[in-house]
Image: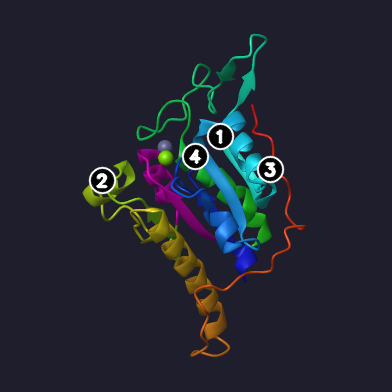
Amino acid sequence: MANDVVIVFDFDKTIIDCDSDNWVVDELGFNECDLRIISDANVFFIETVLKQYGILECFREIKTNPSYVDGEGRLRILPYHDFNSSSHGCHICPPNMCKGVIMERIRATLSAEGKKRFVHAGDGIADFCAGLKLEEGDYLLPRKDFPVWDVICKNPTLIKANIREWSNWNEFETVLLNTVNRFLVADKSSVRADQHIPVDCKFHSSISGHQSALPVPH
Ligand SMILES: [Mg+2]
Ligand SMILES: [Zn+2]
């Protein structure tokens, strides 16, 4: 079932096709999957962009740096982790946000809902850290020739998840869809091994069962 598939996106340029304003969420109709964002951008930026495209409600949760517009109209950004009070303890990620810690928390929160299958897509070193928290059978989708890719190449045995790299938005779209299809094919194989799942399969289009994005905890 697609609804036990959790897809976690980095935000910057990963789910946006800058050339044509395509959105992988929009294009692929991943509405039965549990879509989340872990990004070192900020709430104001991400929500503004997602609202503009009318897809904010497609995301179950957005983990990013809190932000607000101050009395003088300036955007103020606060760290996701308050590193002045305590460090998140990770030496891979910047002090304000460890994606591995966040991934672990998401996994822990969802564990009560039963077995989940995770896909994480991103381009930065912190996305490698998130990838370290994936398990066998999960998928890490790193952007090739970006920092996440360099670290994977230097530490090829540390990631337990399957790795599927991509270089541009078109490849990302294909790799992500193939990854989700792979899960669905595995589900069907117990029923009929030769059943073909078309690559352009659409999930049910209703998003009514999805929650709005949750506020980022301060
Ligand atoms: Mg990034
Ligand atoms: Zn980290």
Reading the image, the residue beneath label 1 is: 64
Reading the image, the residue beneath label 3 is: 213
- In three-dimensional space, the C-alpha distance between marks 1 and 3, rounded to whole angstroms, equals 12 Å
Residue 46 visible in the picture: yes
Please say if the residues under marks 1 and 3 sit with CB atoms less than 8 Å apart. no
In this picture, residue 212 sits left or right of residue 72: right
Quarter where residue 187 is shown: bottom right
Which secondary structure, mark 4?
Answer: helix
Number of other residues with Cα within 10 Å of mark 3, as a class: few under 14, some 14 to 19, many 20 or more? some
Nearer to us in this view, 133 or 173: 173
Q: Which residue shows up at 35% across the image and 35% down it?
A: 92
Which secondary structure, mark 1?
Answer: strand
Image location of residue 185, percent across then percent down: 51, 78
Location of the N terminus by quadrant is bottom right
Disc number placed over residue 150 in the picture, else none? 2
Q: Which residues are magenta?
A: 116-134
Amino acid carrying mark 2 in the image: Asp
Image location of residue 93, percent across then percent down: 39, 33
Mark 4: C-beta under 8 Å from nearest atom of ligand 2: yes
Amino acid carrying mark 4 in the image: Val
Reading the image, the residue beneath label 4 is: 101
Number of other residues with Cα within 10 Å of mark 2, as a class: few under 14, some 14 to 19, many 20 or more? some
Location of the C terminus by quadrant is top right
Amino acid carrying mark 3 in the image: Ala
- In three-dimensional space, the C-alpha distance between marks 4 and 2, rounded to whole angstroms, equals 21 Å
Which secondary structure, mark 2?
Answer: helix
- In three-dimensional space, the C-alpha distance between marks 3 and 2, rounded to whole angstroms, equals 32 Å
Image location of residue 24, percent across then percent down: 52, 56
